[in-house]
Image (spheres, helix red, strand yellow):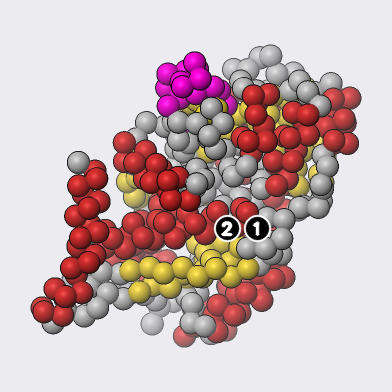
């Protein structure tokens, strides 16, 4: 049935221009999105993968729009999307250069996620730009930068985060650790920039509240994207006597860390945010079975026929696994906001987005109006052998053809992970 719907949608895409001309209808308006993330350098693989997620989701949204799903309430024309990559090399300074280039080229919606340092720089620059040039306002949609300051003391009306921030993820981790009484000694390791620093702070605060008996035997930050060999860090972890590692590392910094741990047969559990991201499970291998956990908004063995079909098609096309389910949420909410706002002006879109409740295949999510932080269910999962390799029958899909996949340990609803906010939102006056 799903394949028939997809076929009909694609047929509608083919037929729509001729039908529109015949009926005298205007062509669909294209909303251009500027994707500002690393497309070169040590994190290029992460940025390129994210861009592929957006391009694929946009194609699906465009098909649905053409068949009448995402149509403006102001008229019959569907909003369509197009995305262009702008390479920031994972640098805050380069992000500002690319932002100016995008604005000068007429882009009014910015997408970014890889690096909270870049996100903080963009959010501040966009707020100042919008105050100076109200006729060229810009909206910032953040799909992955997790520094909680972005929705707390450095919040902005123009910024919306579609991922759970690091405090929310650590809260969920700690809830699971309450039941893991075997965990006694934790080593915290992360990247030395705003996000890694916030993860370190959150782990200390939340464990002191939920598991005060756990000792933090190490708390270390390393240079972002510069470490080629994590063996010295693994040696420190071993010497500390830790039984568990908590890390917010992403990209190559995560893959290289777990690779070094595997090669040295480090006997610890890993609690992560990104174990299912590109390259990580291949680096972990069988050494991670039963030992590596992640906190995400989705993984491939969360039951959903709709997402399963989409994930299979994504993997068949790109040769990599779907990871960012939140990309579909972001684009779906943006489509709905455009239709309800009956405008492409960033301020009017923002006013519709804030407070929006939106139903996804995994349940309802809410863009909290107070700080523009998305509240959504989160999943804690453990890396295990797939059913095809004699593992849990619920693990139907593996990651990166390794025969290893994630099994859900817990679904944690948004009211558990939601954190109070210190945001004092300043909203612009509309003309």
Binning the other alpha carbons within 10 Å of mark 1 as few (below 14), some (14 to 19) or many (20 upward) gives many
- Which residue lies at the image location 39% right of the left edge and 76% below the top edge? 345
- Which residue lies at the image location 43% right of the left edge and 50% below the top edge? 317
Q: Are marks 2 and 1 in contact (CB under 8 Å)?
A: yes
| Residue 146 part of the magenta segment | no
Judge from the rendering whether residue 395 lies leftward or rightward of residue 59; answer left or right: right
- Which residue lies at the image location 60% right of the left edge and 74% below the top edge? 99
Q: Secondary structure at mark 2?
A: helix
- Which residue lies at the image location 22% right of the left edge and 57% below the top edge? 9
Q: Which residue is mark 1?
A: 44
Q: Position of residue 90 (x, y in %)?
A: 69, 61
Judge from the rendering whether residue 115 lies leftward or rightward of residue 329; answer left or right: right
Which disc number belongs to residue 348?
none
Seen in the picture, residue 219 relative to 89 is either above or below; the reply is: above
Q: Between 401 and 60, which is closer to the camera in this rendering?
A: 401
Q: Quadrant of the C terminus?
A: bottom left
Q: Which residue is mark 2?
A: 48
| Residue 385 part of the magenta segment | yes
Q: Quadrant of the N terminus?
A: top left
Judge from the rendering whether residue 53 lies leftward or rightward of residue 178; answer left or right: left
Q: Position of residue 105 (x, y in %)?
A: 52, 83
Evaluate whether residue 250 shows in this view. Answer: yes
Evaluate whether residue 122 shows in this view. Answer: no
Seen in the picture, residue 429 relative to 133 is either above or below; the reply is: above
Boundaries of the magenta span = 378-396
Q: Position of residue 156 (x, y in %)?
A: 55, 64
Seen in the picture, residue 42 relative to 189 is either above or below; the reply is: below
Q: Position of residue 149 (x, y in %)?
A: 64, 54
Q: Secondary structure at mark 1?
A: helix
Q: Between 216 and 355, which is closer to the camera in this rendering?
A: 216
Quarter of the figure with residue 419:
top right
């Amino acid at each position: 049935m799903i394949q028939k719907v997809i076929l009909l949608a694609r047929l509608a895409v083919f037929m729509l221009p001729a039908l529109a001309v015949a009926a005298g209808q205007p062509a669909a308006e294209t909303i251009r999105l500027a994707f500002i993330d690393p497309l070169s350098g040590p994190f290029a693989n992460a940025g390129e993968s994210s861009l592929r997620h957006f391009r694929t989701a946009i194609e699906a949204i465009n098909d649905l729009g053409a068949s009448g799903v995402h149509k403006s309430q102001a008229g019959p024309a569907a909003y369509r999307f197009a995305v262009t990559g702008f390479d920031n090399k994972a640098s805050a300074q380069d992000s500002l250069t690319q932002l100016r280039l995008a604005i000068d080229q007429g882009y009014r919606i910015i997408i970014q996620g890889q690096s909270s340092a870049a996100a903080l720089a963009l959010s501040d620059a966009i707020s100042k730009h919008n105050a100076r040039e109200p006729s060229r306002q810009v909206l910032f949609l953040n799909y992955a930068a997790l520094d909680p300051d972005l929705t707390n003391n450095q919040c902005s009306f123009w910024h919306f985060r579609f991922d759970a921030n690091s405090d929310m993820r650590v809260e969920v981790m700690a809830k699971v650790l309450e039941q893991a009484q075997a965990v006694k000694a934790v080593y915290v390791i992360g990247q030395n920039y705003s996000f890694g620093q916030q993860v370190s702070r959150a782990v200390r605060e939340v464990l002191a509240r939920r598991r005060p008996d756990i000792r933090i035997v190490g708390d270390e930050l390393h240079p972002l994207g510069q470490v080629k060999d994590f063996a010295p860090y693994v040696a420190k972890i071993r010497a500390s006597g830790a039984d568990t590692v908590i890390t917010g590392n992403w990209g190559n910094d995560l893959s290289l860390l777990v690779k070094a741990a595997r090669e040295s047969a480090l006997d610890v559990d890993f609690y992560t945010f990104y174990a299912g991201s590109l390259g990580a499970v291949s680096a972990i291998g069988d050494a991670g079975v039963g030992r590596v956990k992640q906190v995400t908004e989705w993984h491939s063995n969360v039951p959903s026929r709709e997402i399963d079909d989409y994930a299979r098609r994504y993997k068949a096309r790109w040769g990599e696994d779907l990871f960012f389910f939140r990309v579909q949420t972001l684009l779906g909410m943006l489509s709905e906001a455009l239709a309800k706002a009956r405008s492409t002006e960033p301020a009017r879109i923002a006013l519709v987005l804030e407070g929006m409740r939106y139903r996804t295949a995994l349940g309802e999510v809410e863009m909290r109006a107070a700080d523009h932080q998305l509240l959504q269910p989160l999943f804690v999962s453990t890396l295990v052998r797939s059913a095809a390799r004699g593992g849990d029958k619920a693990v139907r899909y593996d990651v990166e053809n390794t025969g290893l996949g994630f099994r859900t340990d817990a679904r944690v609803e948004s009211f558990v992970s939601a954190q109070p906010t210190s945001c004092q939102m300043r909203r612009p006056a509309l003309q």
